[in-house]
Image (tube, rainbow, N blue to C red):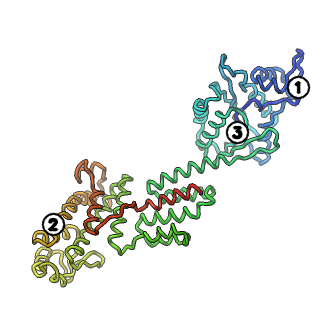
Amino acid sequence: MKMLFANIGNRDVQLKETIHFPDGSELTNDELLKNCRAHGEKLLSHESISTPFLIYPLLSKALQDIVKLGILLDRVVLFSTDQPEGVEFRRTDTLHFAKLLEKWISEEYAEAVHEVEIVRVTENPSSYDLMYLRFEEYMNHFSIRDVETAYVLLSGGTPAMNNALLFLSHKMFDQRVTCLYVKEFEEQPTYLRIGETMRKKDLCESLRILIRRHDYLGARELLETNRELFPKGYDTLHPLLTYAHHRLCFDFKKARAALDPLAGDPRMESLQRKIPDAENVPRSLEELIGHATILYEQGNYIDFLGRLFRFQEAWLSEVLKRKLRLPVRKNRSISLQRKELKKGFRGSEFDGYVASEFKNKLSSTALKLDRPTMSTIIDWHIEKNHPDHNLLQKLMRYSRKMDNLATLRNESPIAHNFKGVSHEDLQNNYGGEDFRVLADMREMYRLLFGSFPETYIFRETNDLVEQVLVHA
């Protein structure tokens, strides 16, 4: 359905010249302007006399231009005031003007307009709040899908009425709205970009919400769908969002490549430098903690447990390498080469312990390491009074707290079962209401690597996107 919405004001109906009525009275434009209600009613009751003298300077120009485009309107909606008796400015009501316009449109544009609807506004037309409620009540009658095109004429009526019509038509019909403004002494209507501006403002806010939620793929799709609204910022925003999405997926190679079109921009080069190398375990763990934080804040608890499981696994491996100086190697899975065991703390005794304790996991060349195996090895070194046994005890207190969460992960759809995970499940399996797992992950990182960066990993990215949006 194609529609035209228009607020009717006191200049929507005018006279070509003074009208002289049979009773000897006369009517001028100035008089008509001051008392639209009474004089409009008189014009209606003397149609045969008044019709040749009437002109419609605002709506006629809008309709003429729309019809010239080959557009046939299913409905023209005229919002007119009709206040109750006793109201101070009731004399300015435009209900009878709307009826004159309805008759004129039905005769003059019979082929181009299927029907005309008059909507009575009985509330105070200067009240922004009341007009919003009245127009919202009317607009809610529509099924959004039914309206293909909505022309909105913002020339007549009060500022409050036009504000409500503008805002609510865009809220309802979005990009299907075209706004027009007709100046009294200009022949052509002006097509306003305020609707586009409002739409862009709403889109920017939607993009900001998605970015703060770290839904960079969703933000990129929204940007692509509305590319024409971002002529200045699109070529910067699109690579930025692509980079952020790939980085969030741990695809660091594609994240770097996404920023290549923006080479030479020091802000982008700064982001590229901060993308970790997957072979750099401390940086990868730092990134992993950041991603786990995002998933937890999003309420994506199953994937959060996946990140936590991987963190604990990699962290235990680093404890073996950095604190116990054990020859951990990477060969598809993490492995420990037996031939080098004797070089470490109580080497021969440890070699014998490994052969006895892990005989079912031991191949001829390597001990395959999993989380329980690594924890058991660290516990052996604590029991044997390793020089760093106090630190090792502290490290393992943190790690053991995570074991229940790792079990929870194993029962979820990302591992071996189909059990869901709630926030209460996380709390019940890790310290009750004092759920400090993210803080503990950062502390575990600090104890092993010396420091943890305070800057949130995507803060620079999000701040940059916000800056570009302002001028996009």
Q: Residue at x 10, y 72 (%)?
A: 384
> Which residue position holds label 2?
390
Q: Is residue 49 left or right of residue 400?
A: right
- Tag 2 secondary structure: helix
> Which residue position holds label 3?
154
Is disc 3 surrounded by few (<14), some (14 to 19) or many (20+) residues within 10 Å? Answer: many
Q: Mark 2–mark 1 contact, CB under 8 Å? A: no
Q: Residue at x 34, y 66 (%)?
A: 286
Foreground mark, 2 or 1?
2
Q: Quadrant of residue 36?
A: top right
For the residue pair 82 and 468, the one nearer the viewer reads as: 468
Q: Amino acid at mark 3?
A: Leu
**Number of the label disc, if any, that sits on residue 102:** none
Is disc 2 surrounded by few (<14), some (14 to 19) or many (20+) residues within 10 Å? Answer: few
Tell which circle, 3 or 2, labels the residue nearer the N-terminal end: 3
Residue 435: percent from the left, percent from the top?
27, 52
Q: Is residue 451 left or right of residue 37?
A: left
